[in-house]
């Protein structure tokens, strides 16, 4: 049996507090090192629009602020406490007019490797999977 893992937002609070305008920071907490089936973490955005081709199913939960996901020119707005499901194969834009923090969970856990993705805006290089 594998023991549960605890992740603390306090470990990244300084990055969140000091995120510049037009910035995004993603901290993957649950990765393929923890699970074969799902991954998840925190995404902090500040006055930004990030276009992305979604290659995994995603749950997004708004922890703070107002988050907007744009799909086919339709705005889906989440306020604190709101949750949305986003199916894979959508071209999306992650947006906010002020700083916001979202939690995301994605499946499959190895979506980056499957899609051959080696760079995600906002994820530090050391948090990206190795190319082996």
Image: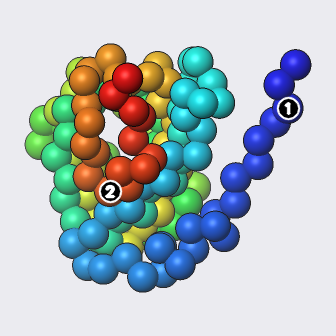
Look at the numbered disc 2 and give the secondary structure of its residue.
loop
Task: Specify whether 40 is left or right of 86.
Answer: right
Q: Mark 1 points at which residue?
A: 3
93 lies above or below 117: below
Q: Identify which residue is drawn at 42% across, 82% down.
A: 18
In terms of depth relative to the viewer, which is nearer, 125 or 58? Answer: 125
The numbered dot on residue 122 is 2
Look at the numbered disc 1 and give the secondary structure of its residue.
loop
Q: Identify which residue is drawn at 70% across, 60% down.
A: 8
Q: Where is residue 68 in the image (x, y as percent from the top left)?
A: 31, 54
In terms of depth relative to the viewer, which is nearer, 26 or 45? Answer: 26
Q: Identify which residue is drawn at 19% across, 32% down.
A: 53
Task: Specify whether 31 is left or right of 44.
Answer: right
Task: Specify whether 22 is left or right of 28.
Answer: left
Q: How crowded is mark 1: few (under 14 residues within 10 Å), some or many (20 or more)?
A: few
The numbered dot on residue 132 is none
Q: How is the image coloured?
A: rainbow
Question: Which image quadrant: the C terminus?
Answer: top left
The quarter holding residue 26 reads bottom left
Which mark sits nearer the N-terminus, 1 or 2? Answer: 1
Q: CA separation, marks 1 and 2?
A: 29 Å
The quarter holding residue 48 reads bottom left
80 lies above or below 35: below
Q: Position of residue 35 (x, y in %)?
A: 63, 24
Count of all numbered marks drawn on residues in the image: 2
Q: Identify which residue is drawn at 19% across, 59% down.
A: 49
């Amino acid at each position: 049996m594998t023991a549960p893992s605890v992740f603390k937002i306090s470990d990244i609070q300084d990055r969140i507090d000091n995120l510049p305008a037009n910035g995004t920071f993603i901290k993957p907490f649950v990765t393929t090192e923890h699970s074969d089936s799902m991954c998840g973490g925190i995404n902090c955005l500040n006055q930004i629009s990030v276009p992305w081709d979604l290659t995994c199913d995603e749950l997004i939960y708004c922890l703070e602020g107002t988050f907007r996901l744009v799909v086919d020119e339709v705005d889906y707005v989440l306020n604190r406490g709101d949750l949305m499901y986003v199916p894979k194969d959508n071209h999306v834009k992650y947006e906010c007019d002020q700083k916001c923090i979202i939690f995301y969970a994605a499946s499959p856990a190895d979506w980056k490797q499957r899609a051959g993705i080696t760079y995600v805006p906002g994820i530090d290089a050391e948090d990206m999977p190795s190319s082996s």
